[in-house]
Image (cartoon, rainbow, N blue to C red):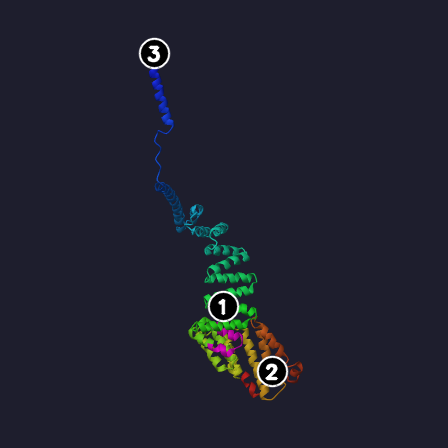
Amino acid sequence: MQNQKSIFWVAILLSITLIVILLANFGCVPPEPKIDPVRQKAIQDSIREASQKKYLFELDKTWSTGYEYHKSGMFRQAIKPFWRVAELDTIQRYKLVWSKLVDAYFKLGVVDSAELACAKGLEQYPDNTYLLRNMAHIQAGRDLNEEAIANYEKIVKLEPDALDDWKKLGSLRLKENLVDEAIRAYEKASELKSDDQESNEILTKLYAQTGNDDAALERLEKLRKQDPTNTKHMFNLGRQYFQREMWSNAEPEFREYLKSNPDDTYAAELLGASLQNQNKFEDAIKVYEDVLKRKPDNKKSYCEIASCLKSLKRYRQARENVRQALKIDANYGYAFLVLGEIYEAAAENCMSDNNRTAPSFDDKLVYQLAYDQFNKAAEDPASRSFAMRRIEYVKQMTPTKEDLFMNKGKTKARGTCYAWIY
């Protein structure tokens, strides 16, 4: 009986254990609660925000380190943090990093590394004109002109008002003998800055080289009209007129220019020459005398006055002015040249006044004086070429051996027209 009770209770315990196991395996334990989608997104955003803050903190800190080094002139120390910024900055927060790197390398004189930084930066920012400009500069320095031209062309397309870049583009095109393209570049530079002397001078030369003098003159007249008070335009236009032998046009330009630049001797000389070529010798003398008031040792002005007086047949005064020039410079070839011309002109005038078609012995003696002066002028390299041409002409008018034999002892020309000489 006792055994039956024991078996009964064992059976009950086994049954309870089985029930518990079954309940545990077939879902009687409550399921985990589901998370609300809004809360799930908030959790994810929070994680991303924390990661982003950490990223930005690292990026900003690295940039700040490099920037402070660079600002303090510690360029070598700035390089490593800047390269780290370039690596980290996938959001293009610090676009200046490549420019700073390039600048640091240039400051350190490491051109190859500057070129590498330019190239890397342009891969990321192909329209960055600072990087393009520095890359073009490096290429031009290595005579890689075609590559430099391509980069400058990109720059002026991105920045059409970049004056210096237009001028550099023009210069490189000239090196590659791209004359027409160079002209267009310098014309653009001149449009951007009408008084840019370098561009205007180069353009004038290029126009002359290409035989386009009319274009040069038209350009200068336009600039003069656009900016009537600009003294550089006055001078440039006057010089262009002078070179084209448009003396009456050149005269007012130089006169107006000299009102503001009275000490410009070169402009005064051009004005004087313009007046001489119009046979306004008295006016020209006044111009040269004004130069001498400002610069008493200007030997050329004395000679130009002498040349004017020669044309006015005032030979004695003319010679006195030549002598003043020779007091300043005893070897001044141009003075001897002008003195020779004075004697030559005196002989020609005396022959004309006396209706002589061939020179008399007296005329020949004066031509000999001219010949001697031209030979002295030929000793000066600056006047040699012109003096030699005068020697060739005058030599045939000097006394021959036969003339000297027939007029022994006669060394001075007779006649009233030669009285001033002795």
Residue bearing mark 3: 3
Nearest to N terminus: mark 2 or mark 3: 3
Percent from the top left, x then y, of residue 208?
A: 55, 70
- For the record, the magenta segment spans 235-252
Decide whether residue 245 is among the magenta residues.
yes
Dot 2: element: helix
> Alpha-carbon neighbours of circle 3 within 10 Å: few (<14), some, or many (≥20)?
few
Which residue: 40% across, 46% down?
59
Left or right of 300 in this view: 66: left
Which quarter of the rendering shows the N terminus?
Answer: top left
Classify residue 337 by image quadrant: bottom right
Percent from the top left, x then y, of residue 233?
A: 46, 71
Percent from the top left, x then y, of residue 253?
A: 47, 76
Q: Amino acid at mark 1?
A: Asn
- Relative to 190, does residue 112 appear above or below in the rendering? above
Tell me the tag on residue 200. 1
Nearest to N terminus: mark 3 or mark 1: 3
Q: Are marks 2 and 1 in contact (CB under 8 Å)?
A: no
In-front residue for pair 193/331: 193
- Relative to 97, does residue 44 appear above or below in the rendering? above
Percent from the top left, x then y, of residue 56?
A: 38, 45
Q: Is residue 209 shown to the viewer in this render?
A: yes
In-front residue for pair 398/70: 70
Q: Amino acid at mark 2?
A: Leu
Q: Is residue 321 shown to the viewer in this render?
A: no
Tell me the tag on residue 365. 2
> Alpha-carbon neighbours of circle 2 within 10 Å: few (<14), some, or many (≥20)?
many
